[in-house]
Amino acid sequence: MPFETTTTLPQRPTIKIFFHGLLILRASSDRSSCAVDIHQSAHPPHTFSVEVRTKSPGRPDIITMRHFGRFDGQHPGLTIRGPRPGVGLVSKYQPTAGFDPTSATGGDESDFRWIINLEGSLFHRAPLSVVEGRTRPGVLLTDGDFCFHAAARLVRPIAITRNGTTTSQIAAMASIIGASLHLEDGTEAVLSWRAAGGASWDYPLEKPTAPDVTYEIYIDNSPLFEPQTGGGGASHSEMPEYYGVIKDEHGRDIPPEQQFDLEFLPTTATTGGDAGPFVPPRGSTKFDLRCCPRIPCQSVVLET
């Protein structure tokens, strides 16, 4: 289902959330919540983690909570609740009606459309499903006005291929997905954890009374460490990893010849090279020492 569209990116949000690694984001049918499915890849093993930081200008971050490893019990294993029970809305930041995915320099760097959308016009153009038995318990964002956007882009020409043939080309993709939540004075967001056996506990994030104090939540599903071998050449793409849990709308496997892949292309003077935000070599695939990761551990969305 589609996210609600907003042309305004929230300024100075109280809480920033960042998604990195093998994660699949989907809005609910009424756009009141967003589910985050966690793909437990074994090639190489990925480790799921959540970290909460309190940020103050001019001071080191205070890490107030960390979680490592899979959730147990029922979905969701973690719920991030905003201050608007039953009336929250999840939206995507799209500042303009037009969007040119072939231009590395044009457009807003935070535009939601830099995020890989496997249901979108450049990919399957149809609803897809997820094998939730292999991705859940996961995370649920609800009861708040969450705005989703591209938090970091990997800028380099990228070919979208299927069955060995290039179907289109894009200038960049989002390697990190961001979400913002604003709290009014006297309100709070709550992280609710649910463990196996029904036990649960809440972790409140109250609107700070001190000026310029904010929170950041990092939700990550990446390898703890993947050594580089072979002189820095490309390794495997992560797209086949997604097709292990993403099926067609009827739950059937997507045939290999219908699956898409991503291929980083050589930079040229006309493409703008790797100008723009640089994403460090962090991910499950090995990286090219001449530049940057070929295919980082990028999160994706499913949105028709």
Image: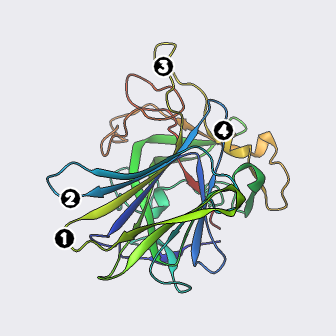
Report how far apart the C-alphas of labels 4 and 1 lie in the structure: 41 Å
**Spot occupied by residue 171 in the image (x, y as percentages of width and height):** 44, 47
Question: Disc 2 marks which amino acid?
Answer: Ser
- Residue 104 is situated, as x and y percent measured from the top left of the image, at 37, 49
Left or right of residue 215, residue 71 in this image: right
Name the residue tied to disc 1. 210
Q: Earlier in the sequence, mark 1 or mark 2?
A: 2
Dot 1: what SS? loop
Q: Kindly state the secondary structure of the residue where label 2 is placed.
A: loop
Q: Earlier in the sequence, mark 3 or mark 4?
A: 4
Give the labeled residue for mark 3. 228
Marks 3 and 2 sit apart, C-alpha to C-alpha, by: 36 Å
* Lower position in the chain sequence, tag 4 or tag 1: 4
Element marked by disc 4: loop
| Crowding at mark 3 (Cα within 10 Å: few <14, some 14-19, many 20+) | some
- Disc 3 residue type (three-letter): Gln
Residue for badge 2: 56
Residue 172 vs residue 138: left or right? left
